[in-house]
Amino acid sequence: MLHEIAEVMAQYRHRVELRQAAGRRAADALLALAAAGGSDGPADGAALEAALHACGLPATGPYRVVAASGGEEGEEGEQTVRALAEALRHSPGEPFAAGRLPGGEAVAVVRAGPDAEGGLPLGELWPLVHACRPQTPLHAGVSGPVPAVGGLTSALGQARYALAAARAGAPGGARVTSVEDLSTLGALLAGVPADVRRAFSSRVLGPLAHAGSTSHRMLLETLESFLAHHGSWARTAATLHLHVNTVHYRIQRIETLTGRDLSRLDHKLDLQAALLCR
């Protein structure tokens, strides 16, 4: 009798694995189609609808895309897909398809609920998933809702950008960032690749970017204080314990070295962004 029970369980397990494998293949195909759209034009809408159907997802939106990273590849990367799927299973009744892009990224397409503007509750679930494998940082980026299948390519780009911001915000831990969270200049810039941020900062700040000398470090400190006090000479001088004339002189030096005019709002924004990108 025990042998027969074991045989029944084995057959059941085999059928479950076959269904899971088929679902995974369908999810991978859907993600590949979504990633195929871009600068060359949108992805094939009819093919996307067929792929959604193969994944068991409704043909009508709204949808969100979630991109996840555990900093791993190969079999370890598969664990990130499973972690993402496990977290999404605990979302309140939102069907999803989770798989990997051709490049190996773990991504899920989620059929969002009626209150799509409210986002997904991954912020609460993700730390619990991370606690099961604390040795590997888990990050996730969530796109905004898109109303139809044709927006999946755009949503994938949003999710990737939000994922990059999550990595920058918590490099050694677990963090979920949604595009709705990118509401400040600093949060927006966090999603820019690190090498691009460094190049921008170096180009805008000029000699001040490296602050190799004492004078340059003082000028950088003055610039940070001046921008933090909204261009107020008096408050900057009081904070730095300087005479106002000294602040004027330092600002003139900063303008000369950077080629920016701190009486102009756009130049102030350039310098503020450069400081945030350091």
Image (cartoon, rainbow, N blue to C red):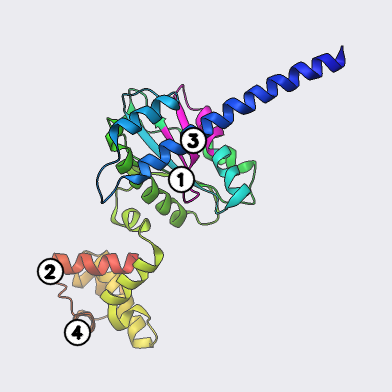
Q: Which residues are magenta?
A: 84-109
* Quadrant containing the C terminus in the rendered view: bottom left
Q: Is residue 95 magenta?
A: yes
Disc 2 versus disc 4: distance between alpha carbons?
14 Å
Q: Which residue is mark 1?
A: 101
Do the residues bearing badges 4 and 1 touch, measured as CB atoms within 8 Å? Answer: no
Nearer-N-terminus badge (2/1): 1
Q: Which residue is mark 4?
A: 256
The answer to whether any part of residue 111 appears in the image is no
Residue 51's image quarter?
A: top left
Residue type beneath disc 2 = Arg
Disc 1 versus disc 3: distance between alpha carbons?
10 Å
Nearer-N-terminus badge (2/4): 4
Q: Nearer the viewer, mark 1 or mark 3?
A: 1
Residue type beneath disc 3 = Ala
Residue type beneath disc 1 = Leu
For numbered disc 4, what is the local secondary structure? helix
Density class for disc 2 (Cα within 10 Å; few <14, some 14-19, many ≥20) is few
What x and y, as percent, mark residue 15?
A: 64, 22
Disc 4 versus disc 1: distance between alpha carbons?
48 Å
Residue type beneath disc 4 = Thr
In the rendered structure, find residue 264 and report the number of the disc placed on it. 2
In the displayed structure image, the side of residue 123 where residue 114 appears, left or right:
left
For numbered disc 2, what is the local secondary structure? loop
Residue closer to the observer: 9 or 205: 9
